[in-house]
Amino acid sequence: MSVLLRTRQLAISYGGIQAVKGIDLEIHQGELVCLIGANGAGKSSTLNALCGMIPAAGEIFFQDQTITGQASHSLLRKGITLVPEGRGIFGRLTVEENLLMGAYIRRDRAAIRQDMKKIYELFPRLDERRTQAAGTLSGGEQQMLALGRAMMSRPRLLLLDEPSMGLAPLVVQRIFATINQIAAEGVTLLLVEQNAKLALQVSQRGYVMENGVITLADASANLLGNPQVQQAYLGL
Ligand code: ATP
């Protein structure tokens, strides 16, 4: 499998505080990889740096080309899309307008219409609520909308920050079923999750992050069986 994204000694600082201390990640084409760790480990910061939202030291390569220091809009054009923590929905816009915002870099109108149809098939609840203000949707529906909007940019690498946050277990199951579907369509995914069990169950490989460094990197099945991971993150 070819490497889609690679980081070398990626480091992120806020003022004098180093939140991410030189990490090496490697994500292959078509993989679903998770990044787990406690609060404040540096997971969100890592995702934000990978999509150009915050500056970082070290190097980032996408399809073997350096993308270090590039702005988020140019990374979006290359196919790197973030679904942020908290979802980033435009509450006053309708569901349909939010979805169209996801396609703002595209000019292929016919294909945009087709993709919109696909999103509505994937999320019938959004179809029923096309003209509803997005701010009035439930948390689970908003997460669906955030995923749908990201898909409208035709991502090659989708970065998901805590998709389960604040959602009831049944809703979380549905969101994760959809994440599986997106992966099955060939989109490469990097998933950050507090819910380590679910993240490891759905992914092929995982990284464990503690205090800004990667402490473990392995197949997710191995991490699920790792006593250290079980004790720290799986409550076993
Ligand atoms: P969580 O799951 O709680 O979001 P995380 O693993 O995603 O945790 P980050 O949000 O990346 O962790 O935060 C890593 C560290 O960087 C934390 O100590 C946090 O306080 C700090 N940090 C994050 N964002 C900022 C910011 N904008 N300004 C200053 N410090 C920040």
Image (spheres, rainbow, N blue to C red):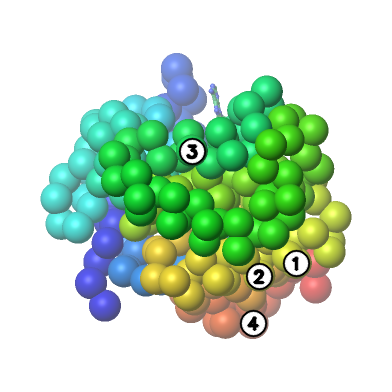
Mark 4 and 1 residues: CB-CB less than 8 Å, in contact? Answer: no
Query: Residue drawn 68% across and 27% down?
Result: 91
Q: Of helix, strand and loop, which one carries label 3?
A: helix
**Residue designated by label 3:** 100
**Residue designated by label 4:** 225
Among numbered discs 4 and 1, the one appearing first in the sequence: 1
**Residue designated by label 1:** 173
Given this view, does label 3 or label 2 mark the residue nearer the observer?
A: 3
Which quarter of the rendering shows the N terminus? Answer: bottom left
Mark identifier at residue 77: none
Query: Residue drawn 64% across and 82% down?
Result: 225
Given this view, does label 1 or label 3 mark the residue nearer the observer?
A: 3
Along the viewing direction, whichever of 75 and 223 lies nearer the viewer: 75
Mark 2 and 1 residues: CB-CB less than 8 Å, in contact? Answer: yes
Q: Amino acid at mark 2?
A: Ala
Q: Of helix, strand and loop, which one carries label 1?
A: helix
Q: Amino acid at mark 3?
A: Leu
Residue 65 appears in the rendering: yes
**Residue designated by label 2:** 177
Disc 3 C-beta below 8 A from ligand 1: no
